[in-house]
């Protein structure tokens, strides 16, 4: 059997829209003839005249929802798209709530917040049928009135967030050469945050390599895997409103950008703060706190960042700090100011 191409959440949603007749064109999919979702479940097979859809595990079909509502005596119920209105008393006694969540993981904060808001409406005595729908909130692929009609409802109104909601969580992500001062500044920033009353999780570079990333080496692929793991954990923390401070070397720009995207998808725009500890190589090498530069120069450590392996300096850092001639406290305060500036009001 040929290998199946793996689809992102957004691509599975596109297949679902096509399959349910919500948007006509065959979606743009990666190369290959067979496709699976992120869990490896077969989703569709490409055929000469289109796509044969095997299974859409996450989404309920609009026709099925409409049929069940009709069976319960809900005929053309009022449909509301997105979060409930600020004043939920304007809603009728019975509401079909359609939450557009394409491309968003099912357990994301944005989805949870929307579902919780509808639970409040239900608790206030209204009947609410809540359905997650494979449409992208920010760029809907189908008009809201047509969406409501497909699920058997009549559009009453909408309240759609243009982008993922801020959860209040933040990821403070340090990058820089070995010996630049990432751990030292991160440690002090954690103390300052604790003193200000915030709970913090520290994912220090060296420590992570002993636990979460034990067994990984320093090839580009292993470095990327290490940074992606840190980013994934940090995004989960920020998704639930926590603060994660990470201090890997993270030498590659593309992976840092992926982590930023992942965190902002989970915790909202502005939740990712990149701190470039830009201490020059000469200064890091002069410090040589762990004796690693001397070893690298002698050729005893292959692929050492800055000596025999690349470091791509960021152009998108929220804070850049060169520690040369500065005390730790001053650097930590600079970083803290950026964290506080990025807080949700
Ligand atoms: P990294 O985590 O980037 O590998 P470390 O924090 O382990 O770096 O080491 C940085 C070294 O630089 C420490 O020995 C620290 O005392 C020294 N240092 C000197 N000035 C500063 C400063 N302003 N901020 C952070 N570290 C500094």
Image (tube, rainbow, N blue to C red):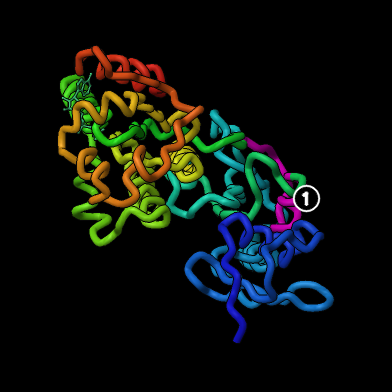
Please say whether residue 161 is visible from this viewpoint.
yes
Magenta range: 144-159
Q: Nearer the viewer, residue 28 or 206?
A: 206
Quarter of the rendered image showing ligand 1: top left
Q: Quadrant of the C terminus?
A: top left
Instruction: Tell me which corner region of the image, top left, top right, bottom left or bottom right, holds residue 289.
Output: top left
141 w.r.t. 42: above or below: above
Residue 255 located within the stretch drawn in magenta: no
Q: How many marks?
A: 1
**The stretch drawn in magenta includes residue 149:** yes
Seen from this angle, which residue lies furthest front?
A: 298
Element marked by disc 1: helix
Q: Residue furthest bottom?
A: 1
Q: Dot 1, crowdedness within 10 Å: few (<14), some or many (≥20)?
A: some
* Res. 199 image quadrant: top left
Residue extending farthest to the right is 49
Q: Residue at x 80, y 72 (%)?
A: 50
> Which residue occupies 28% across, 35% down?
245
Q: Is residue 304 above or below residue 29?
A: above
Can residue 118 be seen? no
Q: Position of residue 243 (x, y in %)?
A: 30, 34
Dot 1 corresponds to which residue? Answer: 146
In the rendering, at what x and y percent does residue 23 appear? Answer: 77, 57
Which percent across, then down, holds residue 235? 38, 44
Residue placed most toward the observer, 236 or 147: 236
Residue 43 relative to residue 216: left or right: right
The answer to whether 51 is drawn above or below residue 166 in the figure is: below
């Amino acid at each position: 059997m040929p290998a199946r191409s793996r689809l992102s959440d957004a691509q599975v949603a596109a297949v679902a829209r096509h399959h349910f007749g919500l948007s006509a064109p065959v979606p743009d999919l990666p190369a290959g003839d067979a496709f699976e979702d992120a869990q490896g479940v077969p989703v569709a097979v490409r055929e000469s005249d289109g796509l044969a859809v095997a299974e859409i595990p996450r989404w309920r079909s609009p026709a099925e929802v409409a049929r069940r509502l009709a069976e319960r005596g809900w005929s053309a119920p009022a449909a509301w798209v997105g979060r409930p209105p600020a004043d939920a008393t304007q809603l009728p006694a019975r509401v079909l709530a359609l939450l557009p969540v394409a491309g968003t993981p099912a357990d994301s904060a944005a989805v949870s917040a929307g579902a919780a808001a509808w639970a409040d409406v239900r608790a206030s005595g209204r009947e609410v049928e809540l359905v997650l729908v494979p449409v992208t909130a920010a760029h809907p692929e189908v008009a809201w009135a047509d969406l409501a009609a497909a699920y058997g409802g009549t559009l009453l109104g909408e309240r759609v967030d243009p982008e993922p909601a801020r959860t209040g969580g933040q990821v403070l992500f340090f990058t820089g050469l070995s010996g630049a001062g990432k751990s030292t500044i991160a440690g002090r920033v954690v103390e300052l945050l604790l003193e200000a009353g915030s709970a913090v999780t520290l994912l220090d570079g060296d420590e992570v390599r002993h636990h979460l990333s034990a067994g990984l080496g320093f090839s580009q692929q292993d470095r990327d895997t290490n940074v992606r793991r840190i980013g994934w954990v940090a995004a989960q923390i920020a998704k639930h409103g926590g603060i994660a401070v990470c201090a890997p070397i993270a030498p590659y720009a593309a992976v840092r950008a992926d982590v930023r995207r992942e965190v902002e998808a989970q915790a909202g725009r502005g939740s990712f703060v990149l701190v470039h500890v830009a201490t020059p190589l000469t200064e890091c090498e002069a410090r040589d706190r762990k004796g690693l530069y001397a070893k690298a120069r002698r050729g005893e450590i292959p692929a050492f960042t800055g000596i025999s392996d690349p470091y791509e300096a960021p152009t998108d850092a929220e804070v850049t700090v060169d520690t040369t001639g500065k005390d730790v406290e001053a650097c930590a305060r600079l970083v803290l100011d950026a964290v506080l500036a990025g807080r949700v009001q």
